[in-house]
């Protein structure tokens, strides 16, 4: 009888293993690629921007703002906010935030690679790999109904925290060091 009491919990945790392993694999693969790939020094053209750094800073700022929309809309969906926000706001703000990160991540990985010379850049590189790993785990856990109830809030919170860290180590640094440029 004792083993039956623990089985649902074990089954729920087992359901989480595949998303977590896939997320970990994504995180490590990005880090390894970023470290082993010879950086080109250039990547995507910064259409509408004066250079790549302003483009990356503004796109990351857009994702950063949408991350706050994600938190507020998630709290609303879970009944913690007191205001009813339609679920499509959460879905579309997340999709748009993710899309805004793609050219930034592409440029970072392809043109710059994973760097560890400067502490800020090392933190930024690791946070970028972590963000995409957590995002992968969250997206794979999302359709599953057999994961523990804390799965989505924890993975969403980790993705939010990583994105805030990415913004602080990139856009905030750029705007306060270089200036606000387009």
Image: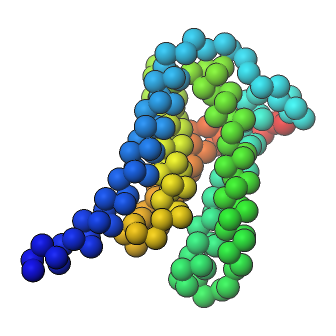
Residue 165: x and y in percent read: 53, 46
- 1 shown above or below 174: below
Q: Would residue 23 appear left or right of 95 to someone viewing this image?
A: left
Q: Which residue is drawn at 26% across and 70% down?
A: 9
Residue 68: x and y in percent read: 63, 63
Q: Which residue is drawn at 67% across and 68% down?
A: 90
Q: Which residue lies furthest to the left in this view?
A: 2
Q: Nearer the viewer, residue 174 or 6?
A: 6
Q: Which residue lies furthest to the right in this view?
A: 48
- 150 shown above or below 50: below
- 133 shown above or below 43: below
- 8 shown above or below 117: below
Q: Residue at x 59, y 79 (%)?
A: 77
Q: Is residue 93 visible?
A: yes
Q: Nearer the viewer, residue 74 or 1?
A: 1
Q: Nearer the viewer, residue 16 or 77?
A: 16
Q: Would residue 6 appear left or right of 172 to someone viewing this image?
A: left
Residue 65: x and y in percent read: 69, 57
Residue 162: x and y in percent read: 51, 48
Q: Would residue 54 appear left or right of 169 to someone viewing this image?
A: right
In the rendered image, the quadrant that contains the C terminus is top right
């Amino acid at each position: 009888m004792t083993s039956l009491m623990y089985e649902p919990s074990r089954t729920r945790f087992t359901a989480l293993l595949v998303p977590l392993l896939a997320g970990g694999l994504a995180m490590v693969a990005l880090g390894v690629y970023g470290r082993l790939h010879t950086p080109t020094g250039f990547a995507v053209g910064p259409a509408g921007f004066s250079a790549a750094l302003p483009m990356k800073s503004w796109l990351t700022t857009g994702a950063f703002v949408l991350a706050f929309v994600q938190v507020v809309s998630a709290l609303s969906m879970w009944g913690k906010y007191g205001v009813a926000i339609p679920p499509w706001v959460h879905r579309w703000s997340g999709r748009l935030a993710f899309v805004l990160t793609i050219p930034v991540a592409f440029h970072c990985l392809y043109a710059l690679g994973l760097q560890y010379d400067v502490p800020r850049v090392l933190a930024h590189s690791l946070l970028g790999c972590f963000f995409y790993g957590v995002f992968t785990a969250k997206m794979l856990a999302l359709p599953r109904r057999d994961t523990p109830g804390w799965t989505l809030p924890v993975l969403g919170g980790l993705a939010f925290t990583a994105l805030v860290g990415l913004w602080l180590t990139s856009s905030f640094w750029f705007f306060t060091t270089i200036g606000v440029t387009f």
